[in-house]
Amino acid sequence: MRRLSTVAELRAALREAPRPLGLVPTMGALHAGHVSLIRAARSECAAVAVSIFVNPRQFGPDEDLERYPRSPDADLALLEREGADYAFTPSPEEMYPPGFAASVHIEGPALPLEGAARPSHFDGVATVVAKLLLQAQPDRAYFGQKDGQQVAVIRRLVRDLDIPSEIAALPTAREADGLAVSSRNAYLTAEERSAAPVVHRALAAARDKFRAGQQNAAELEAACRGIIEASPLASAEYVAAVDPETMAPWSGRGPCMLAAAARIGNVRLLDNVLLE
Ligand code: PAF
């Protein structure tokens, strides 16, 4: 595996890479969710690049940029084990040199839910993902469906800016008790960790109702919210049935994503299920 830390090194190395090239953008603290993305890239592509960059622009001023988990040595060892060909580990100055003045702003799917809760978050995501896609020019880039709204925003980004990379979204990796695997799970205390699977349990219960014929968005949202709120440690910030492409409220027809953001203690967890 080659480790690259500048855009010039990345470009020079990838010019020689066999195609198709798969890119897995990450913020490090690699876990089972990332492993599933890397394995998918490995099985579908002739070369695999993984970027590790904790992107300051997608964190709000009062968010967890400083304490976001970082494990560079373990991450690089994992990438070696998983057979990645290139690890791209740029510094913040490499990605955002002095005088950097660009920002990619997406409307539509970026506005509700996380967009409303975390103003400027998706500008930061869209800007860094646009940069990574332009730097690496992969044939395919891999993201986790756990951040379903992020997937919709990135799909809109590549569609609207004619970026010629295919976007692959892989199913959410889960712990044995259903909790969606996330770097931020590390913030949970032992007590909070045992309460946290309620988010997926609530989404799965609403999905069962959907499968049993419930097609009313408000009923599905209420069923999910009720289960989350019944847990003494959990509170639901939002539960929303939305169109997975536009993030507009689900009309009762076509594909639906039931998305939830919940607080368990001070930790904010996201999860979703697709209702099909
Ligand atoms: O999902 C993430 O880890 C990040 O939002 C991403 C896509 C790597 C951009 O920083």
Image (cartoon, rainbow, N blue to C red):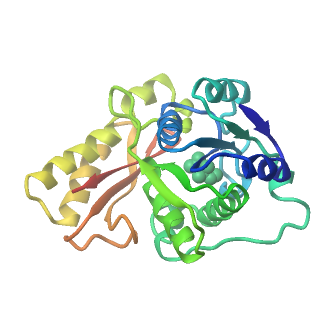
- In the displayed structure, does residue 156 sit left or right of residue 272? right
**Residue 131 location, quadrant:** bottom right
Q: Nearer the viewer, residue 176 or 20?
A: 20
Q: Is residue 114 above or below residue 184?
A: below
- In the displayed structure, does residue 222 sit left or right of residue 149? left
- Residue at 32%, 59% in the rendered image: 257
Q: Is residue 175 above or below residue 150?
A: above
Estimate the x, y position of residue 17 in percent, counting from the top left. 69, 46
**Residue 128 location, quadrant:** bottom right
Estimate the x, y position of residue 169 in percent, counting from the top left. 44, 52
Estimate the x, y position of residue 191 in percent, counting from the top left. 44, 25
- In the displayed structure, does residue 100 sit left or right of residue 61? right
**Residue 251 location, quadrant:** bottom left
Quadrant that contains the N terminus: top right
Estimate the x, y position of residue 114 in percent, counting from the top left. 50, 61
- Residue at 55%, 77% in the rendered image: 160
Quadrant that contains the C terminus: bottom left
Q: What residue occupies the far right of the structure in this picture?
A: 98
Q: Nearer the viewer, residue 254 or 60?
A: 254
- Residue at 21%, 52% in the rendered image: 223
Is residue 248 visible to us here? yes
Is residue 60 visible to us here? no
